[in-house]
Amino acid sequence: MAVRVGLIGAGPWASAVHAPGLARHPGTSLAAVWSRRPDAASALAAGTGARVCDSVDELLARCDAVAFAVPPSVQAELALRAARAGKHLILEKPLAGDVGAAERLADAAAGVTTVMVLTLRYWSRTRDWLDSLAAHDGWAGASLRWLSGALLSGHGSPWRHEGGALADIGPHALDLLDAGIGEITSVLAAEHTEPDLWNLLLAHACGATSTATLSLSLPMRPTVLECAAYGRHGYRTVSGKPENPAAAYAALLGEFVEHVLAGKHEHPCDVRRGLHLQRILAAAGRRAHR
């Protein structure tokens, strides 16, 4: 039996990835859609069989799980309602607009299945890289560069322009470094300069350090995305990003459905992961503005 999923949000990412992914996956059905723009919700739901709902409460009554494609602050508020209603959650990054809201959501969602849409973690090339690192210890450090002009056109959600590279791609970057060489325990240094260029120095539980350089406001074509780890076993790199986000999303849905049906509430990319990343983002912001 397919997991009935309601989708909150009807923007470009919802239309390009969430809605078609949920409608096509054999383990899920797109049962309902709600958006603050009813016309956008109707257009997104067309041809999927999904019910366009007049309220969030109506959507919650029609589904087993909820996927979110809304700004972080809105997600934190509505996902809290969904978790308290016992719904499983497919959550975008960052988890919330601030750490306090992320903590409240993580606490409320402890008894349901959750997964963060950290798409790089579901890409086969990334998984191979992480497996190669996990096969050995002794990694002394890592570095990541993510440079793009994605925000130069002026397109994109207001929250992305306001939060910039740290809020938008920072969760992906921190997740890779953390998964690659061990838990990030502190932000040793952070600098934010124009044009929205972030440089971070991070400490890891194993004693290693890593660096991250992030910007969405540099005229890079194509996007530069490279991550490397180095140590006693050499220099291991992964570069690029999925050409087809739908494939990564399908892999995410497969694991999500398995956990829902098995009654499992812990996943490597669950809400607790989102909270961990939120805390690092906040620490970086504080460090940069001292």
Image (cartoon, helix red, strand yellow):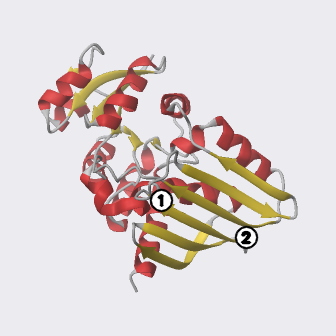
Query: In x, y percent, where is residue 178?
Result: 62, 60
Tell me if 137 is positioned left or right of 245 in this view: right
Depth check, front residue: 153 or 279 = 153
- Above or below, 145 against 43 in this view is below
Query: In x, y percent, where is residue 270?
Result: 50, 48
Q: Quadrant of residue 278?
A: bottom left
Helix, strand or loop at mark 1: helix
Residue 141 shows in this picture: yes
Report the amino acid beneath label 2: Cys
Q: Earlier in the sequence, mark 1 or mark 2?
A: 1
Q: CA distance from mark 1 to mark 2?
A: 21 Å
* Label 2 crowd (10 A; few <14 / some 14-19 / many >=20): some
Which disc is residue 170 wearing?
1
Helix, strand or loop at mark 2: loop
- Above or below, 144 against 185 in this view is above
Depth check, front residue: 143 or 103 = 143
Count the labels in the image. 2
Q: What residue is at 45 percent from the left and 80 percent from the top?
A: 287
Residue under numbered circle 2: 206
Q: What residue is at 52 percent from the left and 53 percent from the top?
A: 172
Report the amino acid beneath label 1: Gly
